[in-house]
Image (tube, grey):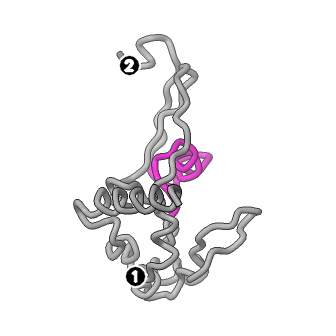
Amino acid sequence: MAARAQGWEADPVTGPMTGAFTLIPPALACGFGELGKHGSLINPELGSNFRLAAVLTDASFALTPPRAHWVDDFCIDCRICEDACPAEAILPEKQTVRGDHKWYVDFDRCLPFFNETHGCAICIAVCPWSRPGVGETLAAKLLRRQQRLAAG
């Protein structure tokens, strides 16, 4: 049954620029995926081929804990999106941004190209995680690697 029908507030938040907050941080916090080198969220099953949306509600529910998918380990050695970026906006190493050490896209380089071409998303298109059926295989491979490393 819908939250509103049960008396709870429920407000949709869709699109990247339609709300008072960005959707990637809460998606990271609940384990939906990890931040990729190209600055977009990578989900192990969907890659970056999705659009985030949320429902703000005062309904109670169990929290979903963060999960590791080892996307970060993959992105460290992968340069595909970095090499494909026509604006050279994807940096090869993590940067400290507002106190967090993370992948960073130089939007001063990205946005002029994006605006001139009325869109881009080359980085997402070339990302190995974004190819249909590849993400789950990569996630399983990275999980096995982490298990081997943990076993010693």
Whether the magenta-drawn stretch holds residue 22 is answered as: yes
Magenta residue span: 15-35
Residue depicted at 54% across the width and 53% down the height: 24
Instruction: Determine contact: label 1, label 2, CB under 8 Å.
Output: no
Residue depicted at 36% across the width and 77% down the height: 122
Answer left or right for 7 relative to 22: left
Answer left or right for 25 relative to 136: right
Residue depicted at 27% across the width and 64% down the height: 134
- Circle 1: residue type: Ile
Answer left or right for 6 relative to 126: right
**Residue 1 drawn at (x, y percent):** 35, 15
Residue depicted at 52% across the width and 65% down the height: 72
Q: Is residue 119 visible?
A: no
The foreground one among 129 and 149 is: 149
**Residue 2 drawn at (x, y percent):** 38, 19
Q: Is residue 8 above or below residue 16?
A: above
By secondary structure, the bulk of the magenta-drawn segment is best described as loop
**SS label for mark 1:** helix
Which residue in the structure is indicated by mark 1? 80
Whether the magenta-drawn stretch holds residue 111 is answered as: no
**SS label for mark 2:** loop
Neighbour tally class for label 2: few under 14, some 14-19, many 20 plus, Cα within 10 Å:
few
- First of labels 1, 2 by sequence position: 2
Name the image quarter holding residue 138.
bottom left
- Circle 2: residue type: Ala
Neighbour tally class for label 1: few under 14, some 14-19, many 20 plus, Cα within 10 Å:
some
The foreground one among 92 and 87 is: 92
Which residue in the structure is indicated by mark 2? 2
- Number of disc labels: 2
**Residue 29 drawn at (x, y percent):** 58, 45
Q: Is residue 127 above or below residue 47?
A: below
Q: Residue lying furthest top in this view?
A: 6
